[in-house]
């Protein structure tokens, strides 16, 4: 199991290898690098794909703290890129991964070729959400995620995926992955609930940026993506006609086509200049 020591912890990561331009994938809360399996499969033929688990999630180590704060998670990603020697890379962040990607692009643009922000926001957690998410988190801490699995699934996935009679096996697989979270996932959830916004920083982003949002995302609604698009100079916004907060697994074909077009456009000029 590949583990990378960074900042006093160990991060689990998967690396497709090869000589292609690197892409680093950064997942959303309650999930893991598995969130990007369809994208790694589609892109690893021409890119070096690296997907990792945030500290306190997936197979990465869990620090004994009340809050795994977003600044620490950001520093972990910087350390991972530097230690693997893959900068400048393309960085694809979904939800929580987007919180990380925005911080890197604003503060360490030397590490990035481009940025893809999926189902994410530059703002703090909306005040209306905080009591509900805090209660869900307390329940998960005391009793595990099983008692709250149904409401969490409705947050994480759009109605199309949840209601499609042909995708029951996929829903069951992702529900089991949700339930597979360790009890101490609450530490990471606190970090998302209590995060500071970076709306004041993202206007300084200058790397090419693609913003993607599913039309059925109720956790980070399309209006949040529109706001990001206004804040980040020169960014491009793609609204998927389907898909919720986990669009990479809900609508992999749409996401793969969108990512491939954007990443190829950023990579080809670099290759031409190198030649």
Image (spheres, rainbow, N blue to C red):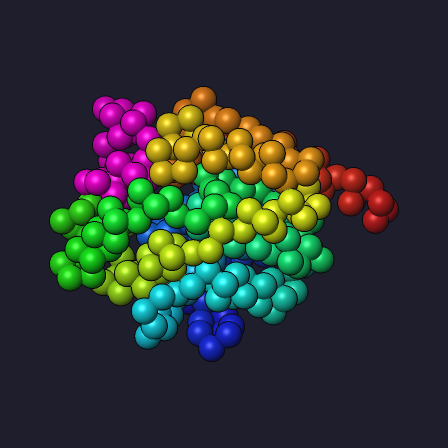
Q: Quadrant of the N terminus?
A: bottom left
Q: Is 66 located above or below residue 119 in the figure?
A: below
Question: In the drawing, does residue 42 fall left or right of residue 112?
Answer: left
Q: Residue furthest bottom?
A: 8
Frontmost residue, 81 versus 2:
81
Q: Is 40 located above or below residue 73 in the figure?
A: above
* Res. 212 visible in picture: no
Question: In the drawing, does residue 210 fall left or right of residue 36?
Answer: right
Q: Which residue does the image show at 78% across and 40% down from the upper left?
A: 269
Residue 165: image quadrant is top left
Q: Is 71 located above or below residue 10 in the figure?
A: above
Residue 240 drawn at (x, y percent): 48, 26
Q: Residue furthest top?
A: 241
Q: Which residues are magenta?
A: 150-174
Q: Which residue does the image show at 57% across and 55% down from the upper left?
A: 103
Count of marks placed on residues:
0
Residue 106 drawn at (x, y percent): 64, 53
Question: In the drawing, does residue 226 fall left or right of residue 221?
Answer: right
* Res. 202 visible in picture: yes
Q: Is residue 255 magenta?
A: no
Q: Which residue does the image show at 64% across and 36% down from the upper left?
A: 235
Frontmost residue, 168 versus 212:
212
Residue 123 drawn at (x, y percent): 47, 46
Predominant secondary structure, magenta span: helix
Frontmost residue, 136 versus 128:
128
Q: Which residue does the image show at 45% across and 67% down from the upper left?
A: 11
């Amino acid at each position: 199991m590949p583990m990378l020591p960074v900042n006093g912890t160990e991060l689990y990561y998967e690396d497709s290898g090869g000589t292609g331009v690197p892409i680093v994938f950064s997942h959303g809360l309650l999930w893991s690098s598995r969130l990007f399996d369809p994208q790694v499969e589609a892109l690893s033929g021409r890119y070096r794909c690296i997907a990792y688990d945030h500290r306190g999630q997936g197979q990465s180590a869990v620090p004994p703290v009340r809050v795994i704060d977003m600044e620490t998670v950001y520093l972990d990603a910087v350390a991972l890129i530097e230690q693997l020697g893959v900068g400048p890379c393309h960085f694809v962040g979904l939800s929580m991964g987007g919180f990380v990607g925005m911080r890197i692009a604003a503060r360490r643009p030397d590490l990035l070729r481009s940025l893809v922000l999926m189902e994410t926001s530059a703002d703090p957690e909306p005040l209306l959400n905080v009591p509900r998410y805090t209660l869900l988190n307390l329940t998960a801490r005391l009793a595990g995620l099983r008692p709250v699995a149904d409401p969490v699934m409705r947050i994480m996935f759009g109605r199309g995926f949840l209601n499609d009679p042909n995708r029951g096996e996929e829903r069951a697989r992702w529900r089991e992955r949700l339930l597979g979270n360790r009890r101490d996932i609450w530490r990471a959830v606190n970090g998302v609930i209590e995060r500071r916004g970076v709306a004041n920083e993202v206007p300084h982003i200058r790397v090419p940026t693609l913003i993607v949002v599913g039309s059925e995302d109720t956790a980070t609604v399309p209006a949040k993506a529109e706001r990001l698009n206004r804040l980040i100079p020169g960014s491009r916004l793609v609204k998927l006609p389907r898909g919720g907060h986990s669009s990479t697994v809900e609508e992999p074909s749409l996401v793969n086509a969108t990512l491939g077009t954007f990443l190829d456009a950023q990579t080809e000029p670099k290759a031409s200049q190198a030649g």
